């Protein structure tokens, strides 16, 4: 393995020969909750960006072993029972979001030497994706598809559906794809910025501009970034939840704003990228850092301060934000 960047210490500590654990109890990995497919996919993106081939192989092998008989993927793995599909009420949506992140990761890393197992998984996920409608599933897949040299038919199909979500929901005071704001919101305009940058799709740019600005204006309190809280989210016309704020939101927001700035050269986006990157280090409603001196990222900002657990999603999304901030010369 090439020399390990100190920023990767946390995800390395959460990683076994199987994959990266989903959750932690304080600083220690919590095996009870097992491994989540989407964490492996996002970790693959990060390890690839940092040039860590050994880590990448672990996450890729997890995805290969997760293949079900129908060609799709199990979403969870537990050491005492093995692979298991999602079984809660909205399992199909959650699974499709995980599948979308897998497509994103596999296109992003774009290894032409992928094994036949991985190539067959990509093919099966592409076939399944043609029926997706959940916006975050569409957006994750589109970020990956935008990496291809020429647009695939699937890209056009998913892009059409995402644009229709905006057309169906937006109003002058609600420039968004859904009638609520929940988690990972910024991935939706982020995907459209990626499509514009690669395909010069002006309609995608127009929607990306409106929705990015709506997100900036809505997710702030007196100029301080305020991600939508998971204790109720924000349903249109109702009260906005301020807590708990999860690192995936500022993480994706920094990535979205990087693409917005690259697409427009508008300093407005750069200034907000700086503010959202700062959320991790105290530019938040509690004025506390979510990042430790050892570069671990806490799981949430609660009304009482940081949630001191430090799991996979939080740390991976922090690293995604770091890479975007670094490219913008903010980190």
Image: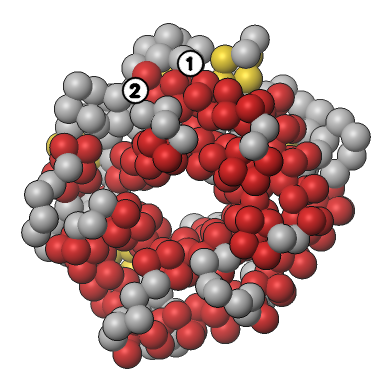
Residues under numbered marks 2 and 1 in contact, where contact means CB atoms less than 8 Å apart: yes
Q: Position of residue 177 (x, y in %)?
A: 75, 48
Residue 123 is situated, as x and y percent measured from the top left of the image, at 48, 85
In the image, what residue occupies the spot 81% across and 29% down? 237
Q: Label 1: few (<14), some or many (≥20) within 10 Å?
A: many
- Is 57 on the left or on the right of 305, as rendered? left
Q: Earlier in the sequence, mark 2 or mark 1?
A: 1
Structure colour scheme: secondary structure
Residue 137 visible (yes or no): no
Label 2 sits on residue: 290
Q: Quadrant of residue 165?
A: bottom right
Mark yes or no: residue 110 visible: yes
SS class, disc 2: loop
The residue positioned 86% from the left and 53% from the top of the image is 167
Residue 7: percent from left, percent from top: 22, 37
Drawn side of residue 60 relative to residue 16, left or right: right
Look at mark 1 in the image and give the residue it sits on: 284
Say which residue appears at 23% left-offset and 30% top-offset. Answer: 295
């Amino acid at each position: 393995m090439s020399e390990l960047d100190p920023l990767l210490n946390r995800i390395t500590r959460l990683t076994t020969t199987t994959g990266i654990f989903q959750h932690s109890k304080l600083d220690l990995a919590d095996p009870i909750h097992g491994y989540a497919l989407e964490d492996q996919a996002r970790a693959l993106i990060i390890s690839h960006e940092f040039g860590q081939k050994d880590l990448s192989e672990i996450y890729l092998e997890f995805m290969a072993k997760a293949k079900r008989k129908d060609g799709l993927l199990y979403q969870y793995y537990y050491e005492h029972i093995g692979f298991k599909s999602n079984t809660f009420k909205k399992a199909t949506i959650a699974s499709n979001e995980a599948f979308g992140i897998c497509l994103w990761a596999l296109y992003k890393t774009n290894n032409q030497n992928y094994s036949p197992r991985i190539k067959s998984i990509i093919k099966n996920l592409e076939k399944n994706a043609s029926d997706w409608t959940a916006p975050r599933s569409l957006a994750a897949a589109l970020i990956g598809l935008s990496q291809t040299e020429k647009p695939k038919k699937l890209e056009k199909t998913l892009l059409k559906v995402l644009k229709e979500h905006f057309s169906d929901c937006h109003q002058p005071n609600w420039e968004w794809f859904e009638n609520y704001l929940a988690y990972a919101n910024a991935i939706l305009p982020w995907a459209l910025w990626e499509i514009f940058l690669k395909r010069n799709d002006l309609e995608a740019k127009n929607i990306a501009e409106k929705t990015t600005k709506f997100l900036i204006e809505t997710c702030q309190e007196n100029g301080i970034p305020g991600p939508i809280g998971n204790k109720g989210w924000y349903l249109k016309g109702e009260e906005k939840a301020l807590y708990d704020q999860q690192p995936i939101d500022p993480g994706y927001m920094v990535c979205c704003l990087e693409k917005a700035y690259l697409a427009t050269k508008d300093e407005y986006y750069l200034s907000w990228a700086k503010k959202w990157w700062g959320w991790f280090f105290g530019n938040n409603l509690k004025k506390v850092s979510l990042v430790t001196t050892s570069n671990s990222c806490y799981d949430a900002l609660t009304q009482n301060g940081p949630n001191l657990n430090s799991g996979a999603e939080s740390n991976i999304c922090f690293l995604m934000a770091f890479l975007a901030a670094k490219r913008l010369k903010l980190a």
